[in-house]
Image (cartoon, rainbow, N blue to C red):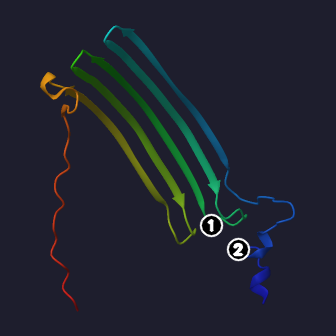
Amino acid sequence: PAFLNNPACYNSQYVNADTNENRGTARQYSDLDLLGTSLSVDWTMPGLTIKTITAYRDVDSQFARDIDESPVQIGHVWDDLQQHQFSQELQMVGSTERLEYAVGLYYFEDDGSFSNYRIPAAPVGGIQTNAYDNDTEATALYSQVTYTPPILEERLAVLGEDELAAPPPVERPPLPRR
């Protein structure tokens, strides 16, 4: 059929497996800048260890592609992703003759953004976009204590710790049958 050779139609004429040539109409690129680092420092003394852990991550990226790789404008996509993350933890772990303990403080922050611009199935698909920002900050204090009373002669220990419990699952009635 004649329409198979029409240069305005997307068909096998644009598939070139021999040269891996891209005949797309949109600029294609991947630009990723990524940095991640962490530092952990311990101070140890008799009966006590203090530890600090610091971490940082930074992502800056932009991507574009012509997903149909033809000179016909069928599908173009552009993405932009930014993220910055920081965490800090301070731990104190120690023991005495009958007591073992761990206490800590944790801090986390994360902010970022993502935007996406697409032209799918042009010209009938229109332009589609997605964009969102995120901003998260969290802190936590945690502890665990184990005490072994002399009367138990180290056969049994009493353990205490803080904990977060998930709420019980919600029971839903079954869906009616048709």
Give neighbour class at mark 1: few <14, some 14-19, many 20+ (Cα, 10 Å): many
Q: Which residue is disc 1 drawn over?
A: 74
Q: Quadrant of the C terminus?
A: bottom left
Q: Is residue 6 above or below residue 177?
A: above
Question: Is 124 located above or below residue 112 in the figure?
Answer: below
Residue furthest to the top: 45
**Mark count:** 2
Which image quarter: residue 21?
A: bottom right
Question: Closest to the observer: 37 or 29?
Answer: 37
* Residue on which the image places disc 2: 10
In which quadrant of the rendered view does residue 151 lie?
top left
Helix, strand, or loop for circle 1?
A: loop
User: Is 92 placed left or right of 124 in the picture?
Assistant: left
Give the CA separation, mark 2 to mark 1.
8 Å
Furthest-left residue in view?
151
| Residue 85 or residue 39, whichever sits in front | 39
From the viewer's perspective, is residue 96 above or below residue 63? above
Q: Is residue 28 above or below residue 8?
A: above
Instruction: Look at label 2 and name its amino acid.
Output: Tyr
Are the residues flagged by discs 2 and 1 in contact, CB closer than 8 Å?
A: yes
Residue 86: percent from left, percent from top: 40, 27
Q: Nearer the viewer, residue 21 or 95?
A: 95
* Residue type, numbered disc 1: Ile
Residue extending farthest to the bottom is 178
The reply, left or right, for residue 30 in relation to residue 126 is right
Q: Residue at x 19, y 60 (%)?
A: 169
Q: Quadrant of the N terminus?
A: bottom right
